[in-house]
Structure formats: structure tokens, C-alpha cells
Image (cartoon, rainbow, N blue to C red):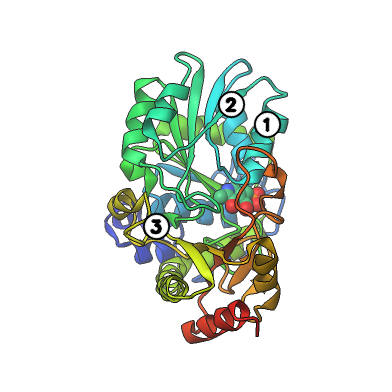
Amino acid sequence: MSQEHADKSGFDTRAIHAGYEPDPTTGAVIPPIFATSTYKQDGVGGLRGGYEYSRSANPTRTALEGALAAVEDGERGFAFASGLAAEDTLVRGLCRPGEHVVLPDDAYGGTFRLFDKVEQVWGLAHTPVPVSDVDAVRAAIRPGETKLVWVETPTNPLLNIADLEALAAVAHDAGALLVVDNTFATPYLQQPLTLGADVVVHSTTKYVGGHSDVVGGALVVRDHDLAERVGFHQNAMGAVAGPFDCFLTHRGLKTLGVRMDRHCDNAERVVEFLAGHAAVTDVIYPGLPEHPGHEVASRQMRRFGGMVSFRVTGGVEHALAVCDRTRVFILGESLGGVESLIEHPGLMTHASVAGTDLEVPADLIRLSVGIETADDLLADLDRALSGG
Ligand SMILES: Cc1ncc(COP(=O)(O)O)c(C=O)c1O
């Protein structure tokens, strides 16, 4: 699809067509898996279509990267071997030792570990703050030193909401860039670059891939200068996505819109059910009017996503029993696949923050609500909560 056409199309049309024209040789409608490391040159320096070596560029990856840029409304997309590989490339590409970043105090644990145990050793300082508090973010910025304000929204697992327009202004006033990890919301529900962010980060392992069958990451940038810098570091650091992984991720991306609508429909049913259950003490979902971030989320998100957290009566023992008793919800880490998952953040995804200020409640359960038949999900939760 031409760039001009892609720019004017709706989300699903872009997700399906952007980044790729049917193959000129065969007419293949889907980007082939180019399992090649190198390319025949038409004489020295005579590259065909710019391809010389697959770390630098591969046509299967080019197609995915074009589609990612189109769905995020960005200048250029970049595909990586994992979400963390994308993050590391971005941070070490844009920051220098002696500089500083502001982080969510409830960032994904692997992101926090990357900053705390890897980038810090390299000389990059960080300050964790509650990103739903704009003043706290402003106060954490070190003028002249802070290069990135890093945000997730909704956060994991407490589903806090950051006001992206307000934080873009705060970051830009201080000469910093706003980076948004859009993994939970996805570009279907929220487009941070259109709200003033400079870079979007994804673990495409989650909703973008959508089928729990591939690990990947992505960056999408807002302007040409950032595209040049990230592109240079993607090639120089080499943590690229391989062609098979790009194929799977791109296949997932094409159905992102319809899947997200079903994730949201099912999550809303689950939230309604949990809110009326006697064994549930609190339901956390940005779509609920009483959620502290509801007003901001309503402004910047199309809908409220497929992640739901809740607390139960009976403390940690009951929470663990519920996780153990579901049959349709699979006990497991990760999120964003078609199948529903249940987990206990305190002892699973967030075990590494136990005993710190970031510790999550012991009676908290997190659901990644999948796209199965909603009635089956409700019956499964009912049985698990009732001890059946
Ligand atoms: C919000 C978020 N960002 C980044 C990552 C890291 O991505 P990956 O596991 O693909 O490296 C994850 C993984 O769980 C995540 O949930």
C-alpha cells in the first residue's frame, strides 16, 4: 500500500495492508519469509532495493516495520528480537553515561531490572516515580541530565494511568523525550505519538503478536532524526528480529483491531461479574468510573483493554487457590494472547519487588482476559472463586 494511501486509511486497513505491496514477481499477498542472510549485488555497491545483509535489513522485517509505523502513526518502525532488546537499543542509542531517566515506580519488572542492573552499571541513573502523578514526574526530572521520561500506561499489574499529553509537555519543557511502552494498550486503543510522545516501545510478544507463539519487540519513532539514530543503533547493536519471527508478528498485527475489541468486550463482562462477587474485595480496571485514572484513560484510549486485576477475601491463601482452580484461564506469566491467563503477581511476575516500595498486595490476582466465549470465562472464575 502506498504511503499516501496508508496515511489516510483506517486502523484495520493499515494493519492489514501497510508496509507491503503484493510481491512483484509472484503476486504473493503475504510477505514471504526471506530466510537469507545476504543478497547478490549487481556489481560492487549495486544493491537491489537497498538489501545487502539481513542484520541491516530483510524484506520480511521491512514489511513488519512499515506496518508498525503505520498503525502507531509514526515516522518509522523497527523490529527487535524481544521487547527488552528494543528497550536496550533505544536507551543506549539515545543516552550517554552520566545522564538520567525517569521511570514508572511500577514499571514491568524486566524493564526495571534493565535500568537497575544493566544501564546503571553503564553509568545511566534512574528515578522511579508514580507516573499517574504529573507533579511527581516533573519533580524527578534533573534539568540538563534527564534525557528520557519513560512511561507505561496502563501499568502492570495495578493498571495506573499516565496522562500522556501532560507528560509530553513536562518532558519537552525539560529537553527530554517522552517514551511510552504501549504494550498493554496497543496502537488500536491508544496512539501515544499522536498525543505528543517521541518514541513508542512494544513487547510485540503480547497483543501485537497476539497468539503466544513468538517473542519480539518494536520501537516506533515520531521524527526523522530519531529514526536515523535508532536505525543506526539497530544495525550497530544487532538485536534484530529474524524473518520467521517477523512473519508471525506481522500475521498477528493484521487482526489486532478485531482481537482487541473482543478482549475489551470480554474484560468488561469479567469486570462486571467480579464487581458483584462476594469473594472479591476490589476490581481494578481503568474502564470503571471509580478508577482514579478513568477520566484520563477515557480521553486517550479508545477502550480500556483486556487486563483486569482484582483482590479477594481470604488473603494470599485464597488468591493462590483461585489461581490454582481455574480451568479455562491458564496459570501463566505473559499476557495478550487469544487464550485467557491468570497469575498471582506477588509470587510470579512481581516476585522481584517483594519487600520494596513496589511490592504488590498478596491478595491480588491479574487476568489477561482472552477472546474465548465470555460465558465460559465467567463460569470458570465463578467455580474458582467459590472453591469448586
Ligand atoms: C509492558 C512490558 N514491556 C516490556 C516487556 C518486555 O518484553 P519481552 O518479554 O518481549 O522482552 C514486557 C514483558 O512482559 C512487558 O509486559
Secondary structure of residue under mark 3: loop
Give neighbour class at mark 2: few <14, some 14-19, many 20+ (Cα, 10 Å). many
Secondary structure of residue under mark 2: strand
Amino acid at pointer 2: His
Give left or right: position of 373 versus 248. left
The answer to whether the residue labelled 1 contacts the one labelled 2, judged by CB atoms less than 8 Å apart, is: yes
Report whether residue 113 is seen.
yes
Amino acid at pointer 1: Asp
Q: Position of residue 352 (x, y in %)?
A: 71, 45
Q: Earlier in the sequence, mark 3 or mark 2?
A: 2
Q: Residue at x 46, y 13 (%)?
A: 144
Quarter of the picture holding the C terminus: bottom right
Instruction: Indicate which label's residue lies in the foreground, 3 or 2.
Output: 3
**Residue nearer the viewer, 134 or 37:** 134
Q: Residue at x 54, y 72 (%)?
A: 279
Instruction: Indicate which label's residue lies in the foreground, 1 or 3.
Output: 3
Q: Which residue is mark 3?
A: 286
Label 1 – label 3 distance at C-alpha: 29 Å
Give neighbour class at mark 3: few <14, some 14-19, many 20+ (Cα, 10 Å). many
Quarter of the picture holding the N terminus: bottom left
Q: Position of residue 217 (x, y in %)?
A: 59, 50
Quarter holding residue 366: bottom right
Quarter holding residue 363: bottom right
Q: Which residue is mark 2?
A: 126
Amino acid at pointer 3: Pro
**Residue nearer the viewer, 40 or 288:** 288
**Residue nearer the viewer, 128 or 231:** 128
Q: Residue at x 49, y 71 (%)?
A: 29
| Mark 3 CB lies closer than 8 A to ligand 1 | no
As drawn, the label of residue 116 is: 1
Q: Earlier in the sequence, mark 1 or mark 2?
A: 1
